[in-house]
Image (cartoon, helix red, strand yellow):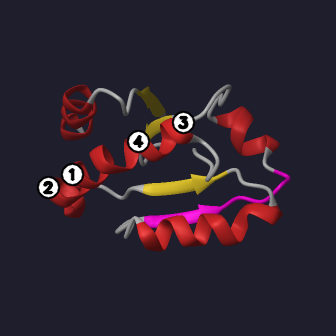
Amino acid sequence: VSAVWCKPCHKRITQLKEIYNHIGNDVNMVYVSLDEKSGLIKWKKLMKEEDIPWSSFWIGENNEKLLDYFNVKVIPHSVIARKDGSYIKVDTGNKEELYNTIMKK
């Protein structure tokens, strides 16, 4: 979970792209934006400028259910969601830990 105004979120994009380019076929990455409707143009521009290869979604301004479900308190907030509905919160700032967590499946 991220937003266009979040500088730490922007810093994570490079690491996420490296991981995605290495194991993209083994994982479905999704970028979820918390931006307000007024920030959508900037968000779309960021996705294009950064050449984000994975799916990205704006969840709108009524996003409390998603934020509660994934226990989002601050952004960037990253989780690995499993097919059974469970999830693990991960630190995308630690590329090695993130990569190892993803590869555990």
Residue drawn at point x = 80 percent, y = 56 percent: 36
Q: Depth-wise, is mark 1 or mark 2 nearer the camera? A: 1
- Near-viewer residue (93 or 20): 93
Q: Earlier in the sequence, mark 1 or mark 3?
A: 1
- Whether pointer 1 and pointer 4 mark residues with C-beta atoms closer than 8 Å, the reply is no
Is 50 placed left or right of 43 in the picture? left
- Whether pointer 1 and pointer 2 mark residues with C-beta atoms closer than 8 Å, the reply is yes
Please identify the quarter of the rendering in which residue 45 is found.
bottom right
Callout 3 amino acid: Pro
Q: CA distance from mark 4 to mark 3?
A: 10 Å
Please identify the quarter of the rendering in which residue 12 is found.
top left
Callout 2 amino acid: His
Q: Depth-wise, is mark 4 or mark 2 nearer the camera? A: 4
Q: Magenta region: which residues?
A: 55-62
Q: Which residue is mark 3?
A: 76
Q: Earlier in the sequence, mark 1 or mark 4?
A: 4
- Whether pointer 4 and pointer 2 mark residues with C-beta atoms closer than 8 Å, the reply is no
Circle 2 SS class: helix
The percent coordinates of residue 31 (x first, y second) are: 50, 56
Is 65 placed left or right of 103 in the picture? right
Q: Any mark on residue 11, and which?
A: 4
Q: Earlier in the sequence, mark 2 or mark 3?
A: 2
Q: Residues within 10 Å of mark 1 (few under 14, many from 20)?
A: few
Residue drawn at point x = 44 percent, y = 29 percent: 88
Q: Residues within 10 Å of mark 4 (few under 14, many from 20)?
A: few
Q: Which residue is mark 1?
A: 18
Q: Depth-wise, is mark 1 or mark 4 nearer the camera? A: 4
Q: Residues within 10 Å of mark 3 (few under 14, many from 20)?
A: some
